[in-house]
């Protein structure tokens, strides 16, 4: 098990959800967490609607993905991982968590 201290989470608590707010002039996806909207993905280009929707879903899934990465890292570091899993897996997960939290890997 890792001895490093996990950084305190300071992002808006999950779960997050993406809501679509179309208008005559633009499409907007707003991300809501803890009852408040805190992020907007929008565009006036109709061709970008699918991309915006995908980006909004990815942003909304971030807290769940961070939790999953933390669980995966704990499992990798528990010693229960099969030797066939590359040693760089833990490092890759640790780097992704650091990127999401602003911590040093």
Image (cartoon, rainbow, N blue to C red):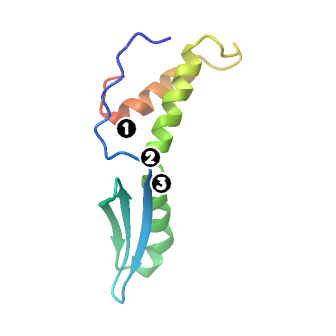
Q: CA distance from mark 3 to mark 1?
A: 13 Å
Residue sitting at the far front: 35
Spot occupied by residue 58 in the image (x, y as percentages of width and height):
47, 54
**Residues at marks 1 and 2 touching, judged by CB atoms closer than 8 Å:** yes
Q: Is residue 25 left or right of residue 97?
A: left
Q: Who's the residue at 30% across and 59% down the image?
A: 36
Q: Position of residue 105 (x, y in %)?
A: 37, 22
The tag earlier along the polypeptide, 3 or 1, is: 3
- Report x, y in % for residue 93: 49, 28
| Residue at numbered disc 2 | 62
Number of residues whose C-alpha sits closer than 10 Å to that of mark 3, classed few (under 14), some (14–19) or many (20 or more): few
Q: Nearer the viewer, residue 54 or 16?
A: 16
Marks 3 and 2 close (CB-CB < 8 Å): yes
Gap between marks 1 and 2 measured at Cα = 9 Å
Q: Which residue is mark 3?
A: 58
Provide the secondary structure element on which disc 3 rests. helix
Label 3 and label 2: CA atoms lie apart by: 6 Å
In the image, which disc is placed on residue 100?
Answer: 1
């Amino acid at each position: 098990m890792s001895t490093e201290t996990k950084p305190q989470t300071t992002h808006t608590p999950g779960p997050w959800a993406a809501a679509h707010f179309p208008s005559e002039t633009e499409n907007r996806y707003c991300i809501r967490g803890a009852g408040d909207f805190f992020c907007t993905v929008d565009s006036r280009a109709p061709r970008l609607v699918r991309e915006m929707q995908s980006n909004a879903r990815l942003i909304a899934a971030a807290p769940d993905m961070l939790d999953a990465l933390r669980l995966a890292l704990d499992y990798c570091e528990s010693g229960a991982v099969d030797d066939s899993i590359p040693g760089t897996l833990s490092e890759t997960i640790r780097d992704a968590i650091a990127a999401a939290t602003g911590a040093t890997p």
